[in-house]
Amino acid sequence: MSRTLALALASFKTLSICSVTSSAASPPFSPLFFSSQRRLPLFNSTPFSHYTKHPPAALAMDSSKVGPVKELPVGLDEATEEDYASQSKLLQEFTSISSIDKAWVFKSESGIGSQAMFSVSQPNLLTNKRRKYMLSSSISTDTNNNVNFQWAPFPVEMTGVSITVPSPSGSKLLVIRNPENESPTQFEIWSSSQLEKEFQIPQSTHGSVYVDGWFEGISWNSDESLLAYVAEEPSPCKPSFDYQGYKQGATKDKECTSWKGQGDWEEEWGECYAGKRQPALFVINLNSGKVHAVKGIEKSLSVGQVVWAPPVEGIDQHLVFVGWLAEPRKLGIKYCYNRPCALYVVKVPLYKSEAAESDIKSLEESTVVNLTQSISSAFFPRFSPDGKFLVFLSAKASVDSGAHSATDSLHRIDWPTDGKLSSSTKIIDVVPVVNCAEDGQFPGLYCSSFLSKPWLSDGCTMVLSSYWHSCQVILSVNVLSGEVLRISPADSVFSWNMLTLDGDNVIAVCSSPVDVPQIRYGRLVDKVNNTTGWHWLNVSSPIFKCSEKVMSLLSHLQFGILQIQVQDVSDCLTKGAAKPFEAIFVSSKVNDAPDPLIVVLHGGPHSVSLSSYSKALAFLSSIGFSLLIVNYRGSVGFGEEALQSLPGKIGSQDVNDVLTAIDHVIEKGLANPSKIAVLGGSHGGFLTTHLIGQAPDKFVAAAARNPVCNLSSMVGITDIPDWCYVESYGTNGKTIFTEAPTAEHLTHFYNKSPISHISKVKAPTIFLLGAQDLRVPVSNGLQYARALKERGVETKVILFPNDIHGIERPQSDFESFLNIGVWFKKYCK
């Protein structure tokens, strides 16, 4: 963190006064990612430049002195180069828009108003990283009850910062800088005016601190003297060799006269965790800088999401954490909530030193207790403000069925005031899994995160974000009564994402496919009776600033959420499976004739495309395409029965749902049947390649990012082989899953795969592939692309050598969507 943070926190400039808004929006979230990292065309080094065309020879030299003709970049012709030039400039304008990653609110020292701090990021195409910075604001209320946000005049860039975590009182700020090599991890403690302390934690103690949003857990204790956190365990000792052969006695140190061997191979948690060592639990004393590894935790247990339990006078403190068992092996965990996990508690013996500070006794005798033995999944632990109960989320529906994501449930444990903890602790259901909701009613919990402090002042109501059909909404949940209320506007088709709480007020972001994100401030009108709902104010902010051109283009677009009736209701085994699914339709306000249509398909399959802003999709809309974003049955947000209708029917039910949605917009006159393209990633790529094979005359072009094309070859090399079984066989696939598929299994996988229909494909198809993808290894897409080329189908492959499944690196993301836009323009116009 810049050492000028104090200056930025202290300086404010009044930019706006909030006003009532009648509509809403949400943060840029999309399960569908496309990106790239290969310098196919050339780009300028100027920060806001666009694709650089080769100048005509006539402009460079006299015709009598014509030199060699400059070559075009690989894959481009002169016509395509013109599209690259125009589209890249526009795409950069969309790409440069910032996004809010986190936010915190602190009470001001005067007791009047509060201070907000926003962690913001922005793609930096030149460095191929995301630039991170902090922007602060003072929040106050005037005599007319209007809310004022006074923004600091400039943000502070957080160069090299991995994560920031404010202390409970808001008087300290922890800044962690993870190294990119074998250097120590750096801990910094900041006050409001200066750097107070700095600690260097060597690799011999632990590796990088986990800041991934899943294993990640950093927790201050109540007096702010201790910090519990999750970091990579230190590198294990490995065998050493020199000119005489093996050296007795393993070593961690490097020596110029010897070299270290590889030692035993260890399992990893798959995609996003390649090269990461086992997550382990540590506690640092912030007064002395001493770091202790928490003992007593089984080696086979990966830990994460640690929080301090409420302190009890005269009794040792406890840590609560989530643990994942790695038996018989570690399977991919990113986006896979079907990995069993539990809440554990471990005692941290403390004593008071002469300086009256908390310190740590020997942790050798710590006993670990499993608090949630009776349930297959427990994570995101949060204590109530009074410490009387512990609330947690569960993905038991996912674990028990084998689906990688499903409907969540919320639970509560009453915390013992005497500190006596037991594995037989009673678990109370707060919000159960919703199988099939009545029309307009709460469809179930679908949460990707919790705030660290989600509580309203009554101490029993938590506020969170969840998916509700094709929208993200903000809910309040009374964890004593189980009452769930939608507090973001019920009539809004925008998506809303919770950022933080300002007392009993909510700071959120809302957006739509055609509206850039905006900050909203929500107030509970009647705090006593909670009967008159929430009042939402519009907050002007410099964070989401974009060009006039982008705003003009978006102002000519519109969107709506379509209800699509299921065609073969007789095939539905449950009521939920027969209910309509949804599609988001984005189109021009001004064109009389329909624009060419891009059908957009999310991955998973158990994820969802939200009615929120996506830079990439807004770009495609702005260059002349309508979008049909289909949430086929099996998507989250629609109840458990609809979701569980898909496993065992991939390649048929989901394909038919997409074709039904396309026919719906054609019948409504919203799409030209001769100008339809399809775009999808991961399972969306599975659907894309299925559709161009099963309905070859329906599509004029296709784009697939890391697509699943051949399950029979994927099952042996993916980090989630169980996914292949569950999605192909249904819940029974969890039972028959094996690391050694039978010939019958492989035949079944092949018949479920897009490659079984490849002989019928006609549509020109572009593939965007991450070479480091562990989820759908690159060989899957390459095999399909080569087979298309072998059959004479127009095919283009862009391989991004350093990208994984998400293809999210800024240059890769940029080049990916640029190529998709040019490809579709070429074949759809």
Image (spheres, rainbow, N blue to C red):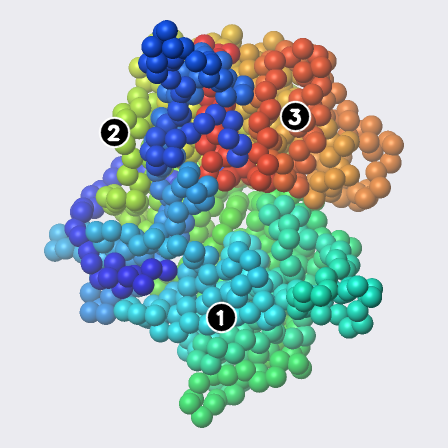
Q: Residue furthest right?
A: 743
Q: Earlier in the sequence, mark 3 or mark 1?
A: 1
Tag of residue 511: none
Left or right of residue 365, residue 599 in this image: left
User: Label 3: which residue?
Assistant: 653
Point out residue 3 in the picture as x, y percentages from the top left corner: 32, 63
Classify mark 1: helix, strand or loop.
Answer: strand
Spatial CA span between label 3 and label 1: 55 Å
CB contact under 8 Å: marks 3 and 2:
no
Q: Amino acid at mark 2?
A: Glu
Q: Amino acid at mark 3?
A: Gln
Spatial CA span between label 3 and label 2: 43 Å
Q: Earlier in the sequence, mark 3 or mark 2?
A: 2
Spatial CA span between label 1 and label 2: 46 Å
Which quadrant holds residue 799?
top right
Q: Amino acid at mark 1?
A: Gln
Label 1: few (<14), some or many (≥20) within 10 Å? few
Report if residue 820 is visible in the image.
yes
User: Label 2: which residue?
Assistant: 548
Q: Residue furthest left?
A: 143
User: Label 1: which residue?
Assistant: 200
**Of discs 3 and 1, which sits in the foreground?**
1
